Amino acid sequence: MEPDEEVLIMVRKHWFVIMAELFGIFILVLLPFVALVGFLIFNQTFATLGVDLYEFANLIGFAVAAWLLLSLLGGFTIWTHYYLDLWIVTDRRIILVDQIHFFSRNVSVFRLERMQDIEFKVKGIIPTLLNFGTLKAQTAGAHESNFNSTGLPDPRGLQAIIQRAMDKRLTTLHIQADEVAAHH
Amino acid sequence: MPGQPTLQLTESVGAFISLADAVLLFFYITVIIYIIYSIILHYHWAQYSTNKAVTWVTLTTYGVTTVPLILIMAALAFTI
C-alpha cells in the first residue's frame, strides 16, 4: 500500500459461486456411503455370485478413506482459490488478485485515473435473484488493458463505489496540478 | 453358487504384485502427495491470506478432517 492510501472495499466472489463448486465435492463425499448402502442391500446377490464383501471390509474401508481424503483435498483447493481471489478497491487503484491455481497467481493493479469505462452485467435467473454478476472495465495507459471479473456480489454497488472513487481521485489530481501550476 | 470358491482378489491383481503390497504402495504414494499438498496449502495461507483467524480455522479444519483419514488408511493398509 502507498502512504495514506485508504482501502474502500475488499470483495471476494459471491458465496453462491463457492457453494456451487463445493456441492460437487459434497456429492463426491456422499458417493462411497451410497455405494456402501448399495453393497449392504445387495449383499445377498453378491453372496450368490461367490463374493463375500465382509472378506474385503478392510480393503473397502481403505478405499473409502482414500476417496474421502482426495475429495477433501479437492474441497480445500476450491476454498483456497476462492478465499485468495480478491478485489481490493482503494482511493487510488484497484488491485485484482487472481489465484488461478496453486502455482499461478496473478496480481493486477489498475490506477483509478486511468480507468475509462466500467460496466456490470447480471445475466441469468440465479445471478439476478442473488445479485451477483460480472464487472468489466477498460483502462487507458501506455498499454491499454481490460479486466473482466465474474461472480462478484452486488456489481451495481461495486461499480458505484469505483465510479465515486474515480471522480474523487480525478478531482484530487486536478487540484494538485492547479497548485503546482500556481507555484510556478 | 454353492460349492463355488470365494473370489480371491489377490489372484486377480496378478502375479506381478500382491494385493497387500499394492495397497501399501498406494498408501505410501497417497502419504507423499498428502505431505506435499499440505506444505503447499500451508504456504499459500501463510503467505497470501488477509485474515489470520480464517487461516487458523482453515488449517485446523484441514488437519482435523484429513489426519484421521490418513491414520485410518495406515491402520487398514497394514492389516490387508
Image: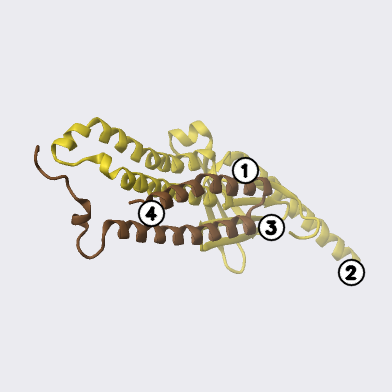
Residue B40 visible in this rendered orientation of the protein: yes
Residue B28: x and y in percent read 41, 60
Whether discs 1 and 4 lie on one chain: the answer is no
| Disc 3 secondary structure class | helix
| Disc 4 secondary structure class | loop
Whether discs 1 and 2 lie on one chain: the answer is yes
Chain A: what color?
Answer: yellow
- Distance from Cα at disc 1 to Cα at disc 2: 39 Å
Image quadrant holding the C terminus of chain A, namely bottom right
Q: Which mark sits nearer the N-terminus, 2 or 3?
A: 3
Q: In front of the other: label 4 or label 2? A: 4
Pointer 2 residue: A184
* Residue at (45% x, 47% y) in the render: B69
Q: Which mark sits nearer the N-terminus, 1 or 2?
A: 1
Q: Chain of mark 2?
A: A
Q: Callout 1 environment at 10 Å: few (<14), some (14 to 19), or many (20+)?
A: some
Whether discs 3 and 4 lie on one chain: the answer is no
Whether discs 3 and 1 lie on one chain: the answer is yes
Residue A14: x and y in percent read 54, 41
Pointer 1 residue: A158
* Residue at (67% x, 45% y) in the render: B53
Q: Please tell me in which quadrant of the rendered image residue A159 appears.
A: top right
**Three-letter code, disc 2:** His
Image quadrant holding the N terminus of chain A, namely bottom right
Residue B59: x and y in percent read 59, 49
Whether discs 4 and 2 lie on one chain: the answer is no
Q: Please tell me in which quadrant of the rendered image residue B25 appears.
A: bottom left
- Distance from Cα at disc 4 to Cα at disc 2: 83 Å
| Disc 1 secondary structure class | helix
**Three-letter code, disc 4:** Phe
